[in-house]
Amino acid sequence: MSSIHPKLLIVEDDPGLQAQLKWAYEDFDVLVAGDRQTAIALLRAEEPPVVTLDLGLPPDPDGVSEGFAILDEIMALKPDTKVIVASGHGARESALRAIQRGAYDFYAKPIDIDALGLIVRRALHVWKLEQENRLLAERAPEDHRVLGRLITAAPEMVKVARTIERVANTNVSVMLLGASGTGKELLARGLHDASSRARGAFVAINCAAIPENLLESELFGHEKGAFTGAVKTTEGKIEQASGGTLFLDEVGDIPLQLQVKLLRFLQERTIERIGGRRSIEVDTRIVCATHQNLDAMIADGRFREDLYYRLAEIVVRIPGLADRPGDAVLLARAFLARFSAEMNPAIKGFAADALAAIDGWGWPGNVRELENRLKRAVIMADGKLVTAADLDLAEPGAAEDQTLNLKSAREATDRRMIRHALARSDGNITNTARLLGISRPTLYDLLKQYDLQH
């Protein structure tokens, strides 16, 4: 029968001190080890959240080598364990080495049971907070996925996803309009995966990243000998995507001469490779995206109007991250889980100031900016919690958009704050109400009044 008390592993070779410590922690399920083998076996079997570790253990009872070997092994096996190191050997030097190698805290001998008890209970409290944060980080992305990959709880973005789902199984061309970094390629992939073409290839090309003189060959392919360097026949992206989907990112950067050839393909569904003499039938669906104002480009003669109407049979406008209340926190948790697993497993979650900063930042670079800041923070963070300083984010500003309609302003503020609080608490009503400083019944009334999902 398992204990209801939290587990505490005491690694100490003095039998008298073992008994004294075990007696002092009646509110813990105390495990005792006198050597490395026993300690590691108990760590693997019982997974105690807190360990007190005497550095002076046999076969080096007068030194610290064995204790540090145990510390290193604990950090390798269970890096979230809170290890409190105790030693009388060169206390200051040992303390610095222990903290650098992952120990939670250090206590110099002789041991004061009451003082050490405070450190142990504080360590357990921090461990519990980190575990809650980790569970939220793992659960939040799955709870809020749409289109298989897209993480959102914002009604504005859910509406976008539902539109894409509705048009996925048609053959209409789709134009995605939105600022850089809003996730246009992710949405295009979601459309492909939700369509009957999902078994075909999804081919993406950034039209702005390829020089004009190479873009035609990239799209339409070329025959061997068509130009200098064409040493073999090569299929273009349109042909590679036959039976699937071609995503043309930054379609506004296609030069006018090439726009004519792309229009001909959309009308006839055939292509000719550069240097080729035969028409090739191609069954490719086109999805395109741009952050540019195509209406202005059409007016200036830089983009063909007939091509626009061929490409934009359905237009989907993607809101920026700042217009998706609560999504920044959800996405940040997903990025943190991914990047910490890949690059820094010691990172266990966000500090409170980081969540506040993420929630309050304007995100001019949208999701791409958030992703880049999280990646850098995970690499550079010194502690186990990512802070606002690690993210290089200023305190959220207090300035708000102004309106002369007080009722509308109040409602807009209520909606925004409720969405933010729901995201911060991962949809937990009790925690959301606590964050907002209101009762649960009041929160339920507001959710119903503003038609907000939770």
Image: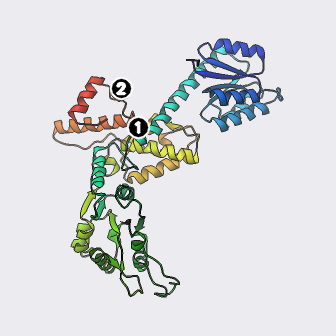
At 61% from the left and 22% from the top, the residue drawn is 7
Query: Mark 1 = which residue?
Result: 356
Picture disc at residue 292: none
Q: Position of residue 179 (x, y in %)?
A: 33, 58
- Depth check, mark 1 against mark 2: the one in front is 2
At 37% from the left and 42% from the top, the residue drawn is 144
Q: Position of residue 246 (x, y in %)?
A: 38, 67
Picture quadrant of residue 244: bottom left
Please state which of residues 244 and 222 is positioned toward the viewer in this rendering: 244
Q: Quadrant of the C terminus?
A: top left
> Secondary structure beneath disc 2?
helix
At 47% from the left and 46% from the top, the residue drawn is 335
Distance Cα–Cα, label 1 vs label 2: 19 Å
| Marked residue nearer the N-terminal end (1 or 2) | 1
Picture quadrant of residue 64: top right
At 67% from the left and 20% from the top, the residue drawn is 31
Left or right of residue 31, residue 244 in this image: left
Please state which of residues 114 and 151 is positioned toward the viewer in this rendering: 151
Asked if residue 403 is positioned above or below residue 232 in the image, the reply reads: above
Query: Mark 2 = which residue?
Result: 430
Asked if residue 404 is positioned above or below residue 319 in the image, the reply reads: above
Q: Position of residue 422 (x, y in %)?
A: 34, 35
* Residue type, mark 2 in image: Thr
Scheme of image coloration: rainbow
Left or right of residue 305, residue 352 in this image: right
* Residue type, mark 1 in image: Ala
Q: Position of residue 341 (x, y in %)?
A: 55, 45
